[in-house]
Amino acid sequence: MNEILLVTGMSGAGRSTVSATLEDLGWFVIDNLPLELIARVSDLAVSGSPDFVGVAFVVGRSGRVVPDQFLAVLNELRMQHESAKVLYLEAPDEVLIHRFEGTRRRHPFPAPSVADAIAAERALMQSIKMSADLVIDTGSLNINQLRHRISEAFHTADGPGAMKVSIQSFGYSHGLPRDVDIVFDCRFLPNPHWVEELRPFSGLDEPVSSYVLEQSDAQHFLGDVIELLSWQIPAFAKEGKSYLSIAIGCTGGRHRSVAIAEEIGRRLDFSVAVSHRDVDR
């Protein structure tokens, strides 16, 4: 076991779900350990049972995080363990407000209102967010989608330390994903939504997939994207990037982007995880 992960981020952004998901994936999860103990405990955990994929420390779930202390611990961890990474969970203010109001939980930051508490926490956490290896915006994700996002980011098929590559389709009408590195737009392709017999299906279904992929412009687009990613992905890995997230967008996220994302996943000579944010909308 040699993977080390610090999980932190905005209160209400989903640390509990991430903690449970990592446990299901075979991680040894330690919640709310004092920051000053993390480096010492990580040595014990890494040298312990080989039955675990890695050790994840969930930081700040019941209170505020001191950025200077967090960054000092992170630097110490990275000197001791090359694989040490930070996962930062994010969500828009309005989503966090809705979550706190829905659960009636008290925000850990003392402030006149939940909105004020969120603003204060966001400002405090900015330097930690900037140090993160992976930022996931959970604002548009339900619990099952977040679990899937964590599963695809932390699958271990490529071995510890390998860069994790994910491809996600989405619909521009539902908002641009906020936590992706590369975005491709396929709205120039004919839209199956306007073909009555294809409308009920999605890009996962053969009739829609064939309609999209048989377009000459689609083949031209796929060729260019595959050529680009074929050298970019190894270049990102060489530079030490741990996670690379690629998004493919169309209008609604149900037809064209789904078919294109699936085809890119099939054509790439790399292990990738493919998901579809808006296919069921």
Image: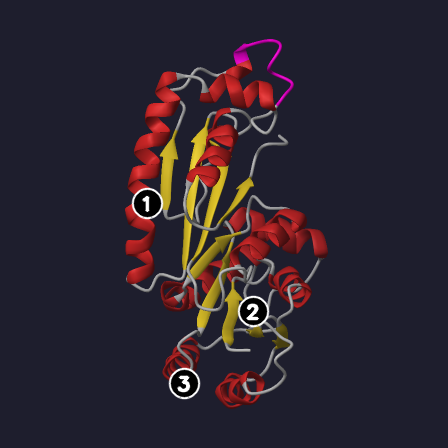
Nearer to me, 52 or 11? 52
Give SS at disc 3: helix
Q: What is the C-alpha distance between the residues marked 3 and 1?
A: 33 Å
Relative height, residue 278 to residue 66 (above, below): above
Quarter of the C terminus within the rendering:
top right
What mark, if any, has residue 80 been given in the picture? 3
Q: Residue at x 62, y 65 (%)?
A: 22
Give yes or no for contact between labels 1 and 2 (Cβ–Cβ under 8 Å).
Answer: no
Q: Nearer the viewer, mark 3 or mark 2?
A: 3
Residue type highlighted by circle 2: Pro
Give SS at disc 1: helix
Give the residue at mark 1: 230
Q: How many marks?
A: 3
Q: What is the C-alpha distance between the residues marked 3 and 2?
A: 36 Å
Q: Earlier in the sequence, mark 1 or mark 2?
A: 2
Magenta residues, start to end: 194-201
**Residue 204 sits in which quadrant?**
top right
Residue type highlighted by circle 3: Gln
Q: Where's residue 269, x and y in %?
A: 41, 46
Give the residue at mark 2: 110
Q: Residue at x 44, y 60 (%)?
A: 134
Q: Earlier in the sequence, mark 3 or mark 2?
A: 3
Q: Residue at x 59, y 23 (%)?
A: 206
Q: Residue at x 60, y 59 (%)?
A: 12
Give yes or no for contact between labels 3 and 1 (Cβ–Cβ under 8 Å).
Answer: no
